[in-house]
Image (cartoon, rainbow, N blue to C red):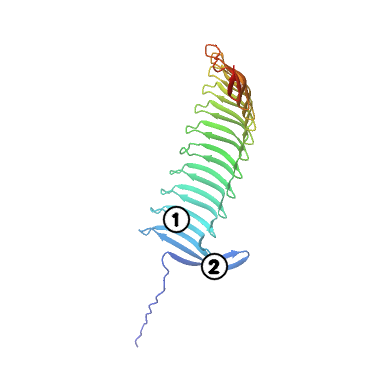
Amino acid sequence: MSIHVLLLLVVVPVAPPELHVAAAMVQDAGKVEVGKVEVIEERYADGTPKLRREVRRDKDGVVNHGLFQSWHPNAQISRTGRAVDGRWEGLVLDYYINGKLKDESEYKRGVRHGRHNTYWYEGEVKRIESYKDGALHGRFEDYRFGPGLKSVEGQYVDGKEDGVWKEYDNAGAVLSEGAYKLGAKHGLWITRNAAGQKTMEETYRDGLIDGVSREFAPTGERLVEVHYKAGKSEGVRTEWYLSGVKKSENGYIGGVPNGRSAAWFEDGKPQVEGEMKAGKRNGRWTFWNADGSVNAAWSGVYENDKRIGD
């Protein structure tokens, strides 16, 4: 008895290599539906992976939904994360071509929520920050000068600077230090030079200079002292020479020169004296030469900055 064996060649259609289809269970408002999650893949010319992302289709087209991965041409991972209905969800990581972490961001419904750190090419921290519902919130540090070289540190509350902030130069010296309140400078702010010497001292209230502001020479001598009220000069502005001799003294009201105005040569002799009204010379003004003699050509009676008589 002979046995005949029938071989059947079954041809099964194969989807293009770029697109694979898998069944997925989608939970929506308590109702379970069966949807389709499509896996889209792309490859470089040499066949190495370039992109793999899980997507789904909606009325507007294809959106990322599920795992997302991409690779550099050398097969190092470049990005990995997850999306829900086209929006990032959870931790998303980006990498340099050398495999070192470049960026890590946490998301909630497509907006940053949680930590967001960036790194230099060799792995050192470049920036540290965190978010709440898309707004900066919490600790902030920036290392823009290079690995290990902090340039700024402070904190945010709901997208606004709050608390003490410091700014550094590329050698690590503190250049400025002061506090914010809800995004506005508030309290004492001090500015220094690279040698650490104080160059400016200002007091703020709700973002406006308010109180005494002082400017100093690199050698520590006081150069300028101004009184402010709600951001405008109010009272006497005084300047000094490096020698400590008074240079000038001018009155202000609402940011405009008003009242007595006087200046001196560095040897202490008078240089000019008169009255300002609404920012202009008015009344009698006297000017002196360096030898102490009166400058008759300039001295006299003024009206709205114009000399009208002797």
The image's mark for residue 35 is 2
Q: Is residue 97 above or below residue 221?
A: below
Residue at 53% in and 47% down: 116
Residue 106's x, y, as percent? Answer: 54, 50
- Quarter of the figure that contains the C terminus: top right
Q: Earlier in the sequence, mark 1 or mark 2?
A: 2
Report crowding for label 1: few under 14, some 14 to 19, many 20 or more residues within 10 A (C-alpha).
many
Q: Is residue 151 visible?
A: yes
Question: Circle 1 sits on which residue?
Answer: 70
Residue extending furthest toward the bottom: 1
> x and y percent of residue 264 in the render?
56, 16
Image-based side of 46 in relation to 278, left or right: left
Q: Amino acid at mark 1?
A: Ser
Q: CA distance from mark 1 to mark 2?
A: 24 Å
Quarter of the picture holding the N terminus? bottom left
The correct choice, above or below, for 58 with respect to 309 in the image is below
SS class, disc 1: strand
